[in-house]
Image (cartoon, rainbow, N blue to C red):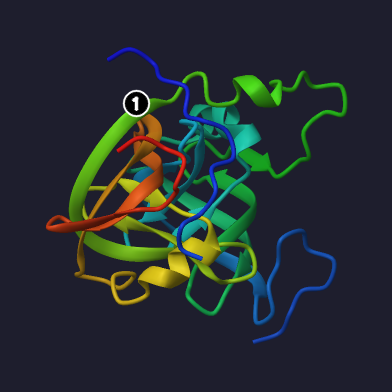
């Protein structure tokens, strides 16, 4: 499938104790450690691994700029120990991940200040047009806790800006059957897309007024 570049900036049609100083922490987050085994990796629409789901269902987030270090450290099925922040929904923002088998540890670090950055006009150059449907396993949330998409039971991730996602609250729940079209990535770690249309398989809504169907 040939890569397609999505149009830029479309216009929407549809209109416990907090740990201080933690980047991206939300009210109600608690710091601590947890252990488990990796059930599957989670990617963002650009194809970077930015977390994983544990066997107990907990969703663990890690910075996407550290994607290559993360997949070098752990594999699916590995037992790991995580130090970080857990929110009220059970999601974990990892600050440190240790592979229990190898003893190797990876710490959250900011990207180097001199790291080359992709020009804004090229950030969608590697994305492809995708169409998906399935049953919701869990709802994903933005840093402030507002819904911003879903993970389907087959592991597919559908992302939307929070103001758009709020228009579909009846579908943003476990076991809802949904469909989406958009631009994203399918690779060895999973499939994820930024939705340009969302709804049910029989009634999908175009989210932006300046994109073709």
Q: Which of the 4 image quadrants contains residue 64?
A: top right
Taking the view exactly as shown, the residue that stands out farthest to the left is 202
Mark 1, other Cα within 10 Å: few <14 / some 14–19 / many ≥20 = few
- When the figure is inspected, residue 161 is found, relative to residue 86, above or below; the finding is above
| Closer to us: 23 or 75 | 23
Q: Is residue 44 left or right of residue 107?
A: left
Q: Residue visible at 33% across and 12% down?
A: 2
| Closer to us: 135 or 1 | 1
Q: Residue visible at 51% across and 27% down?
A: 72
Quarter that holds the N terminus: top left
Taking the view exactly as shown, the residue that stands out farthest to the front is 209
Q: Which of the 4 image quadrants contains residue 117?
A: top right
Q: Is residue 57 visible?
A: no
**Circle 1 sits on which residue?**
187
Taking the view exactly as shown, the residue that stands out farthest to the top is 2
Q: Is residue 180 visible?
A: yes
Q: Is residue 39 left or right of residue 90?
A: left
Taking the view exactly as shown, the residue that stands out farthest to the bottom is 16
Quarter that holds the C terminus: top left
Q: Position of residue 56 (x, y in %)?
A: 33, 65
Q: Residue visible at 65% across and 82% down?
A: 28
- When the figure is inspected, residue 42 is found, relative to residue 1, above or below; the finding is below
Q: Residue visible at 47% across and 29% down?
A: 6
């Amino acid at each position: 499938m040939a890569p397609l570049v999505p149009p830029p900036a479309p216009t929407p049609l549809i209109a416990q104790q907090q740990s201080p100083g933690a980047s991206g922490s939300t009210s109600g987050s608690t710091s601590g450690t947890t252990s488990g085994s990796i059930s599957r990796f989670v990617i963002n629409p650009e194809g970077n691994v930015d977390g994983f789901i544990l066997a107990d269902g907990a969703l663990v987030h890690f910075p996407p700029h550290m994607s290559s270090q993360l997949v070098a450290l752990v594999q699916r099925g590995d037992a790991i120990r995580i130090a970080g922040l857990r929110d009220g929904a059970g999601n974990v923002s990892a600050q440190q991940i240790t592979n229990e088998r190898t003893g190797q540890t990876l710490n959250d670090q900011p990207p180097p200040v001199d790291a080359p950055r992709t020009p804004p006009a090229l950030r969608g150059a590697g994305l492809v047009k995708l169409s998906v449907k399935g049953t919701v396993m869990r709802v994903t949330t933005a840093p402030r806790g507002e819904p911003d998409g879903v993970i389907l039971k087959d592991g597919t991730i559908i992302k939307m800006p929070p103001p758009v996602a709020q228009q579909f609250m009846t579908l943003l729940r476990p076991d809802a059957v949904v469909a989406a079209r958009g631009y994203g990535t399918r690779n060895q770690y999973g499939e994820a897309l930024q939705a340009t249309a969302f709804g049910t398989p029989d009634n999908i809504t175009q989210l932006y007024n300046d994109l073709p169907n």
